[in-house]
């Protein structure tokens, strides 16, 4: 039996870790207060937790793909030490106008395009109608809408989107407003 699952898709910078510009090494990660607790609450409610993050620093030559992978591994390690776990991380290394080489291109994965979200939904058998996208940028909100999941905004407020102070507030909203 192939059952669908529900998920919370999360932007990384500004939602899980402090957005300090381009994070170029694992040492620069700083987990935002209450994030591990919010992730634990969402997992206990049965949500997959998947990061979808634009990382155009690769295209711009500020970091390598290996740096992005190392940063992702360190993020997972830090969260595990605090009792939280991610199911997967996806990132887009492209930029349509900045940088040089193979990563300077139009792509389907860079938010607001829904490519990363749709890939995660396909690979994890996620039901969009039961899932959420949490971001701190209008690109995140548009990507969620483009993928058919309900977006929540941290910061803001953009028009027509539920806005929350941080991931914990967004997690509580999700738990109080189940879908499906």
Image (cartoon, grey):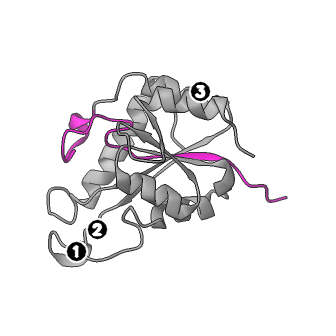
Residue 96 falls inside the magenta stretch:
no
Find disc 2 in the rendering and name its residue: 94
Neighbours of disc 1 within 10 Å: few (<14), some (14-19), many (20+): some
x and y percent of residue 119 in the render?
53, 65
Q: First in sequence: mark 2 or mark 3?
A: 3
User: Who's the residue at 54% across and 31% down the image?
Assistant: 171
Q: Secondary structure at mark 2?
A: loop
Quick check: marks 3 and 1 in contact, CB under 8 Å? no
Neighbours of disc 2 within 10 Å: few (<14), some (14-19), many (20+): many
Left or right: 51 in relation to 110: right
- Dominant secondary structure, magenta: loop
x and y percent of residue 102 in the render?
24, 77
The quadrant of the rendering that contains the N terminus is: bottom right
User: Who's the residue at 18% across and 77% down the image?
Assistant: 101
Find disc 3 in the rendering and name its residue: 41
Left or right: 65 in relation to 153: left
Give me the disc on residue 66: none
Query: Between residues 151 and 64, which one lies in front from this camera angle?
Result: 151
Residue furthest right as drawn = 1
Q: Secondary structure at mark 1?
A: loop
Give how far apart the Cα atoms at labels 2 and 3 are.
33 Å
Residue 142's place in the image compared with 158, above or below, is below
Magenta segment boundaries in residue numbering: 1-29
Q: First in sequence: mark 3 or mark 1?
A: 3
């Amino acid at each position: 039996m192939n059952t669908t699952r529900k998920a919370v898709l999360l932007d990384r910078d500004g939602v899980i870790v402090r957005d300090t510009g381009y994070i170029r090494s694992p040492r620069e990660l700083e987990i935002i207060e209450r994030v591990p607790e919010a992730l634990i609450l969402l997992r206990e409610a049965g949500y997959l937790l998947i990061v979808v993050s634009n990382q155009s620093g690769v295209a711009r030559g500020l970091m390598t793909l290996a740096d992005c992978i190392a940063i992702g591994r360190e993020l997972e390690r830090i969260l595990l030490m605090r009792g939280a776990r991610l199911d997967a991380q996806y990132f887009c290394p492209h930029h349509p106008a900045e940088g040089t080489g193979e990563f300077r291109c139009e792509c389907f994965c860079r938010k607001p395009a829904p490519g990363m979200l749709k890939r995660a939904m396909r690979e994890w058998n996620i039901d969009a109608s039961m899932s959420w996208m949490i971001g701190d940028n209008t690109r995140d909100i548009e990507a969620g809408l483009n993928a058919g999941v309900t977006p929540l905004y941290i910061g803001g407020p953009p028009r027509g989107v539920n806005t929350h102070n941080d991931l914990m507030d967004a997690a509580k909203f999700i738990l109080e407003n189940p879908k499906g």
